[in-house]
């Protein structure tokens, strides 16, 4: 059973960092983590990059591009997911 965890973000670098710290601290590691960033102009992209390859067993997928709101961003995450179950963390 594989889980896909999806986080959407737009200009909330501090909240994103806290969320990512929580996700990467999990002991269960059979999941992929997908971050959809709405082309933020804060340092969100750098925070995401800081987590790349941090925990080799966690597959991090992410994009940073303009979207058409929260549901469009969520749908992008669903399209990128390969898990049997989806979880949304904001």
Image (cartoon, rainbow, N blue to C red):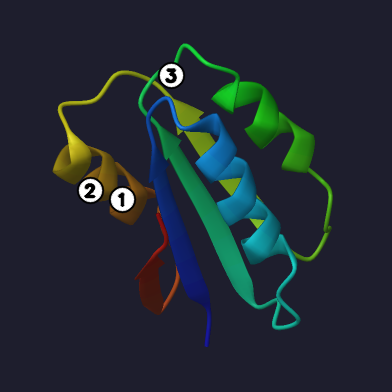
Left or right, 41 with respect to 22, comes to left
Where residue 23 sits in the image (x, y, percent)?
63, 64
Where residue 78 sits in the image (x, y, percent)?
31, 55
Count residues near mark 1 (Cα–Cα under 10 Å), then give few for <14, some for 14-19, many for 20+.
few
In the image, residue 50 above or below residue 29 = above
Q: Earlier in the sequence, mark 3 or mark 1?
A: 3
**Total numbered labels:** 3
Label 1 element class: helix
Q: Residue at x 71, y 62 (%)?
A: 24
In the image, residue 39 above or below residue 60 = above
Q: Quadrant of the C terminus?
A: bottom left
Marks 2/1: CA–CA distance = 6 Å
Label 3 element class: loop
Please say if the residues under marks 2 and 1 sit with CB atoms less than 8 Å apart.
yes
Q: Please give the residue where the numbered disc 1 appears in the rendered image.
A: 79
Marks 2/3: CA–CA distance = 18 Å
Which label was assigned to residue 40? 3
Q: Residue at x 26, y 48 (%)?
A: 74
Q: Please give the residue where the numbered disc 2 appears in the rendered image.
A: 75
Tag in front: 3 or 1: 3
Where residue 49 sits in the image (x, y, percent)?
71, 31
Marks 3/1: CA–CA distance = 21 Å
57 and 14: which one is in front?
14
Tag in front: 2 or 1: 2
Which label was assigned to residue 10? none
Where residue 61 sits in the image (x, y, percent)?
56, 45
Q: Residue at x 47, y 11 (%)?
A: 41
Looking at the rendering, which quadrant does residue 50 occupy?
top right
């Amino acid at each position: 059973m594989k889980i896909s965890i999806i986080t959407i973000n737009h200009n909330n670098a501090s909240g994103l960092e806290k969320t990512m710290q929580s996700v990467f601290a999990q002991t269960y590691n059979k999941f992929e983590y997908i971050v959809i960033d709405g082309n933020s102009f804060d340092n969100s992209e750098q925070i995401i990059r800081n987590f790349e390859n941090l925990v080799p067993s966690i597959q991090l997928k992410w994009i940073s591009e303009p979207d058409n709101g929260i549901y469009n961003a969520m749908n992008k995450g669903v399209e990128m997911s390969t898990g049997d179950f989806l979880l949304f963390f904001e």
